[in-house]
Amino acid sequence: MSLLKGIGASAYIKTGKVKKIEKYRDAADLEGGEIIVASKISRDMLPKIKKAGAVVTDYGGLTSHVAITLRELKIPCVVGTEKATNILDNDMIVTVDGHTGHIYQGIIEFEEELELFELQETATNLKVNLNIPAIASSISPYVDGVGSIRIENIVIETGKHPYILLEKGLLSDVLVNGIEQILDAFYPKPVWFRTFDIPTDELKNLDGGKIEPTEKNSLLGLRAIYKDLRDIEVLKAEFRAVKTLLDRGYSNLGLKFPFLRDVSEYYAAKKIMKDIGLKPHHDLDVGVSIETPSAALCIKDYINAKIDFVSIGMSDLTMCSLAVDRRGVKVAKHFNLKHPAVLSLVNMVINRCHKKGLETCIAGYAGCDRSIVRKLIHMGMPSISTNPDQILKMRQYIDVVEKEIRLKSAREILVR
């Protein structure tokens, strides 16, 4: 019997005993295999819940960083149930279906379907979004590079706020150790990493995190490049890590700045790179992540400021364009990645970059949604960055879409 239903955010199935988590420190008592039930899970909890059997939350959405990481770890996840913490009790045996979003009472046996996929060659570059360096070597043969390393997880794994690591002189070393694993696994394929983008509420539970302000909506608050430009020493540590990796001979490293609101932030960040001894566009490719309407509408300004590539984060772009909190359950029905306004902004960025010979790449959840990927390929998007668990499925799907386009073009020529 289905006890409740939410949004299936990681399409795996697991049965286990319920363990409710109310506070960050509750996660420290996990033995392994429990069905974690919580009001919400923040990214700083991930090191603690990596051994969970499944995760069920009252709040959250498909595009949350926690859902994305759990998909990489192949841990079933159901978010946005609104009432899981009220209905599910400690020690209950439940089965979580991360595909349909149903939570069943007791043990439910599902017949697993074995899917076999050929490794299709496609004109569209297929890249991967990566949170966890340890899995890099197992997926590198099947993709054309890394569209986004989320270096935040490398830091969160230490359990310490970036300020603490900085004070101890460890921040750059922590980043080098994590990123180097990925560069090694993918060399010589391009690997793009983005500078820090950790909302303040996801830093609070780390050692030293009490310094962070309380924000009612941290996704629209002190985050990403704006925060880094206020915490310049943290940004410098990130750049020193880049310099170390370049000095070690890695020529496949690219860097992108997230959640830009104004081109002045891009200029300021590049100036700090130069102060550290890095030459943007010479020592490595430098690009931007278009995640706000202001950045999309002013793409010409970024092109004029010189960029080597453009990444598009459709989840944040949708949130900002439609004025919808992407973690908000009550307004979830209004969060529409395929809204005409969002697609119009994306199409404009693709066209402007194409005219200048710049590669554009979609990153984040949108790269896992077939209907969105189809629209993007028809727009001329040259690169798709998907999640590790979707690589072979997405490569096969892209091949189908490309064949449809070629067939349509051939028929149009015959008609003429």
Image (spheres, helix red, strand yellow):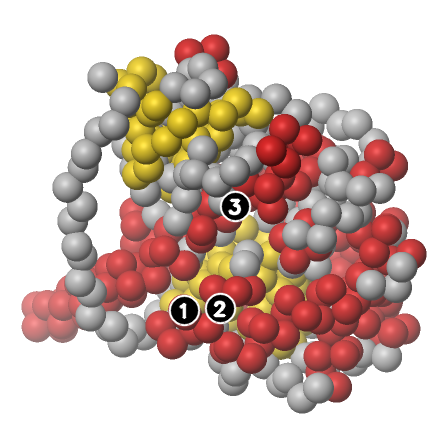
* 333, above or below 88, in the image: below
Foreground mark, 3 or 2? 3
* Coordinates of residue 346 in the picture (x, y in percent): 48, 52
Q: Is residue 73 visible?
A: yes
Residues at circles 3 and 2 in contact by the CB criterion of under 8 Å = no
Circle 3 residues within 10 Å: few <14, some 14–19, many ≥20: some
Query: What residue is shown with label 3?
Result: 50
Say which residue appears at 48% left-offset and 40% top-offset. Answer: 32
- Residue located 86% across and 51% down the image: 164
Q: CA distance from mark 3 to mark 2?
A: 17 Å
Residue 313 place in picture, x, y as percent: 54, 51
Q: Which residue is mark 1?
A: 139
What is the tally of numbered marks visible in this picture? 3
Within 10 Å of disc 2 (Cα), the crowding (few <14, some 14-19, many 20+) is many
Q: Position of residue 216 (x, y in %)?
A: 72, 24
Q: Determine which residue is flagged by label 2.
A: 136
Viewer-side residue, 193 vs 204: 204
Residue type at the position of mark 1: Ile
Rendered image quadrant of residue 376: bottom left
- In the current view of this chain or complex, which residue is farthest to the bottom? 249
Q: What's the amino acid at mark 2?
A: Ala
Residues at marks 1 and 2 touching, judged by CB atoms closer than 8 Å: yes
- Residue 20, placed above or below residue 241: above
Query: Is 369 in front, or is 381?
Result: 369
The quadrant of the image that shows the C terminus is bottom left
